[in-house]
Image (cartoon, rainbow, N blue to C red):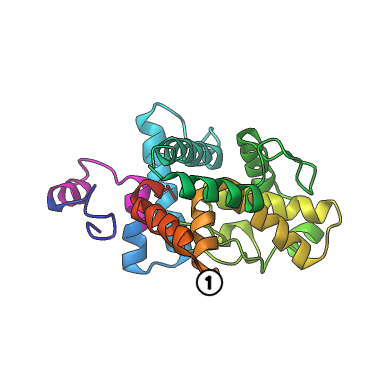
Amino acid sequence: MWERLDYSEMDSSVLSKVINGQRLFTFKQLRVFCDIMNFSHKQRNMLFDALTNDKMMNEGLDYKKENKFLYRAKLNNQANTTNSKRKSMILLDNRSRILLKKIFSEIIPKTNELSKIGIKFSNKSYYLLVNKGIQKYRPFVENKSSDFDVSIPYCGFKKTVEGLENNCKCGYHLALYGVIKECIVQKIFSKDAIQAELKKWVSFFFPMESVIYYLENLSSRDNTTTILLHNLKRNSRLLQGYN
């Protein structure tokens, strides 16, 4: 865990306190723990649900009455906002900065730009989509919501399956389920069209990680592109999120 957390946030004393009930894992630490133990998604969901209950109780919230999905979604969004501020601290030379701006304009939706499902790309829309993701729709919608690629950084869950209880319940995945369901409600049935819409939302939620992926998959890179990729990956520790 220490190694996978970039040699920080975890040592034997921290782990001992967790084991003995003196402190809780963070969501990021629990994610890494589950990865190492190779737990199933059912096991992961059970552990994250238990950790959510404990954290809510520590904050004086009643997890039986409050919406746990929205609580974790809020933590997701707070983490992403903090990371966005950290990303702005990455120092780049002038050429790299110009190239980064150009790539952003090409692959990242602009804030408040209208998406294909009529919802603006914004932080407020994140909560709207989470609510749509956890909402129970008629069987026709639910049955068509499986087998979509919802890969995001820092979470190993890849493809949706039937039944919310069998899918990852981190905030960003709940939001992506909302995108899928909204596409189907609006009669966007083409799998490619829905997948393209998902890709746009993932890019909006994880802009810097999407740029790194874009650069890594270029057929060829010049010197400026190589330097930019190197600098962004070098700062990858700043780009870590929550489950």
User: Residue 111 occupies which quadrant of the picture?
Assistant: top right
Q: Does the magenta segment cover residue 17?
A: yes
Task: Report the front residue among 113 and 157.
Answer: 113
Q: Which residue is identified by label 1?
A: 220
What residue is drawn where x is 64% and y is 53%?
Answer: 107
Residue 186 lies left or right of residue 199; in this view the side is right
Residue 217: x and y in percent read 53, 69
The type of residue carrying mark 1 is Ser
Residue 24 in sight in this render = yes
Under tag 1, what secondary structure? loop
Q: Does the magenta segment cover residue 181?
A: no
Residue 154 in sight in this render = no
What residue is drawn where x is 55% and y is 61%?
Answer: 214
Task: Report the front residue among 8 and 243.
Answer: 8
Residue 37 lies left or right of residue 142; in this view the side is left
Residue 191: x and y in percent read 76, 67
Is the residue 14 above or below the residue 2 in the image? Answer: above
Q: Quadrant of the N terminus?
A: bottom left
Task: Report the front residue among 131 and 187.
Answer: 187
The magenta-colored residue range is: 13-31
- The residue lying furthest to the left in this view is 13
